[in-house]
Image: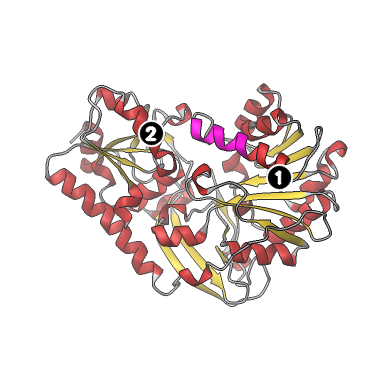
Amino acid sequence: MGNDAEERLAGALPIPETEGREASAAMTEHTASKQSCRCRVCGSGPLSRWVHLPAMPLTEELRPLDDRSAPFLADIDVYVCADCGVSQTVGERDLSPYYVDYGYTVGQSPFAARFMQRLADTVRDRYGLQPGFTVIEIGSGDGAQLECFRRAGADVYGVEPSSELCRASRQRGVPVMEALFEPETAALLPEPFRPADVLLMTYTFDHLPDPAGTLAAARDVLHPGKGLLVLEVHDLARIVERREYCLFEHEHYTYWTARTLGEALGRSGFRLLTTDLLPENERRGNSLLIAAAPTDAAHSPDRLLLVDEEAQIDYDEFQRELDSGIAALDAFVEREAAAGRRIAGYGGGGRGVMTMAAMASSWRLAYVCDANTGLHGRRAPKSGVPVADISRLAQQPVDTLIVFSYGYMDEIREAVMKLPGAPNRIVSMLDILK
């Protein structure tokens, strides 16, 4: 057992309970009286809870190693609307202070870089966009995706709430507005980008508390005759199939299937064009990637547009499946530890943070590796597991490596196996959750 694990077990690095939530400056909750029991998408209901994860942290609230302050912890409860079928949280939280210092990026991943360029080139070629087409990205991060669109011949503009990521975007020459996108933000976009040819949101749409208002704003921003809306969200059907409880986060307000997303688009004046914008093997870990257009636009939908996966979700049974998956992870870790094997994780981003936060055995992980240098020298919230560079695997070898960032499994395995003293076993968390 490593020193970090021993200290966490002994209590020198305590794991705070839920009373620590008031101490967090990263996030403030609206009062319960302002919570609504109506669906945030269709305004109807009723809503029924089908997911419950107690005392969970924010995915990016990693703290320095010597910071003993309590992280934000609160239950995650997900409800499904009986009318429109969209899964969602209830109420809202002010995330603007949290996002100011948000630093998540996948720029270090060759797979992610290939995905972003393929997405840009495919959108351009598939829909016949000409040089100089205009692209706005909501939640544009460090500008990496927009840089790919610029290489594809587009004029680009981003909207991003993180001041750190806005600085990185401007350093690479990608103009950006520092703002958390709300429907009224659309009126502040520069005149040359209104109307826009493409409005892009990759893993952003589900972070916005007003989906219907966002889609209405998108409708106003896009060119009515040729505009394209490109959305990437986590695929709820896959979450359920894989028991990926780590994708239920405080930062996510909505959870979508192809069917519920298509129906929401239809109610907002859009027509779903494709759910197959890129082949699955070119998409990121759990990616529902779609293109849509205003109803009157000239673009035609795919001939074979099948969006009937909703029947796969058993809302009454999933909580038991979720609990079973967490128990399977704990059992795996305990078996490895009982056999005298040293264990670490790979992936200090959201998947790793949330996976470890729900586990009773996370204290047994010596550390978790990540390629994102901004995470190094910090501890994951609640679990307290330290995040380190991949070189830690050579300096403090382990026997077993659990990969939380399974979408990058091939490149992670290749990088790890080049190290001296590489782990004997590298296993995806998905294989354990089964």
Residue 204 lies left or right of residue 342; in this view the side is right
Residue 88 lies left or right of residue 381; in this view the side is right
- Type of residue at label 2? Ile
The percent coordinates of residue 291 (x first, y second) are 68, 52
Residue drawn at point x = 40 percent, y = 57 percent: 242
Q: Name the residue under label 2.
A: 412
Quadrant of residue 322 within the rendered picture: bottom left
303 shown above or below 139: below
Residue furthest out toward the front: 303
Mark 2: which secondary structure? Answer: helix
Q: Name the residue under label 1.
A: 126
Mark 1: which secondary structure? Answer: helix
Quadrant of residue 253 within the rendered picture: bottom right
Q: Is residue 114 magenta?
A: yes
Q: Which of marks 1 and 2 is nearer the N terminus?
A: 1
- Res 77 seen here: yes
The percent coordinates of residue 379 (x first, y second) are 38, 36
**Which range is magenta?**
110-118
**Viewer-side residue, 88 vs 304:** 304
Q: Quadrant of the C terminus?
A: bottom left
Residue drawn at point x = 75 percent, y = 34 percent: 156
Q: Mark 1 against mark 2, which lies toward the viewer?
A: 1
Q: How far apart are marks 1 and 2 (CA)?
A: 31 Å
- Type of residue at label 1? Arg
Residue 133 lies left or right of residue 289; in this view the side is right
